[in-house]
């Protein structure tokens, strides 16, 4: 039986979105295939290894599977002028921005070794972000009711500003995609989208 589970951390630095997406997919599919094998061949199990990938990306907008393209307020030619790319991807959530000065985290985890509850998993990630921000003297919390992510002034709906966005994908209890924490991000790029499809809430860094 498989009792030990390793979690590896990788810091990839500044990397193009497509390159990191391809790497995520490769790791994700390999883990899913191992789990399929283990179900059929329990006497010869292949261990899975979870990964937490940190990186940042050149300017890019990504749209989740349930998102609306009209939440991107730029045409293809305007995207080029701003030096940004655009990808429609398979995570949950709507549109978001990634760029320099932002820490993006991609947990590719086998939840068989943790718990079968994606909402609890996201809650734990949010807790980790909130605790990390507290280390830097920044008070943050979960979003106003009905909103995911980590927010500043979260208790005041008028002033609440999102500092960390989340969007995940799971299959066979394997996760991919993750979170984007604004550290020193150029917030001007958020003016070209309706972030996460929410038109009455601000973002911050």
Image (tube, helix red, strand yellow):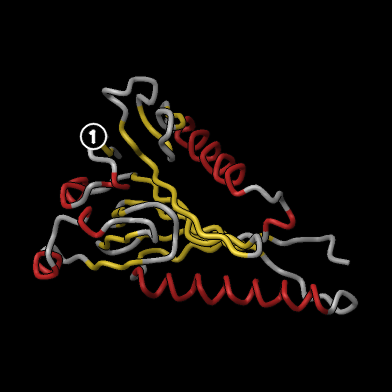
- Taking the spot 84% from the left edge, 79% from the top edge, the residue there is 41
Between residue 92 and residue 61, name the one nearer to us.
92
- Taking the spot 32% from the left edge, 60% from the top edge, the residue there is 63
Which quarter of the rendering shows the N terminus? bottom right
Tag 1 residue: 200
Residue 14 picture quarter: bottom left
Is residue 156 visible in the rendered image? The answer is yes
Residue 137 locus on image (x, y percent)? 42, 27
In this image, 194 relative to 124: left or right? Answer: left
Number of labelled discs?
Answer: 1
Q: Residue furthest top?
A: 156
Residue 60 locus on image (x, y percent)? 27, 63
In this image, 144 relative to 158: left or right? Answer: right
| Above or below for 75 versus 67 | below
Is residue 100 visible in the rendered image? The answer is no
Density class for disc 1 (Cα within 10 Å; few <14, some 14-19, many ≥20) is few
In this image, 132 relative to 18: left or right? Answer: right
| Above or below for 160 versus 115 | above
Which quarter of the rendering shows the C terminus? top left
- Taking the spot 65% from the left edge, 72% from the top edge, the residue there is 31
- Taking the spot 44% from the left edge, 52% from the top edge, the residue there is 167
Residue 142 locus on image (x, y percent)? 46, 31
């Amino acid at each position: 039986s498989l009792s030990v589970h390793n979690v590896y951390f990788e810091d990839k630095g500044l990397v193009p979105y497509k390159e990191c997406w391809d790497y995520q997919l490769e790791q994700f599919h390999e883990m899913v295939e191992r789990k399929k094998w283990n179900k059929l061949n329990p006497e010869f199990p292949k261990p899975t290894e979870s990964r937490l990938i940190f990186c940042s990306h050149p300017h890019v907008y990504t749209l989740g599977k349930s998102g609306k393209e009209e939440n991107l307020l730029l045409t293809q030619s305007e995207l080029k002028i701003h030096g940004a790319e655009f990808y429609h991807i398979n995570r949950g959530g709507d549109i978001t921005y990634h760029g320099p000065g932002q820490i993006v985290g991609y947990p590719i985890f086998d939840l068989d070794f943790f718990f079968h509850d994606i909402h609890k998993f996201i809650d734990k990630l949010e807790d980790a972000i909130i605790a990390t921000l507290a280390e830097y003297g920044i008070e943050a919390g979960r979003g106003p009711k009905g909103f995911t992510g980590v927010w500043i002034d979260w208790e005041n709906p008028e002033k609440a500003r999102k500092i960390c966005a989340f969007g995940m994908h799971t299959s066979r209890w394997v996760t991919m995609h993750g979170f984007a924490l604004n550290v020193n991000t150029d917030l001007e790029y958020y003016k070209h989208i309706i972030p996460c499809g929410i038109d009455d809430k601000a973002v911050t860094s």
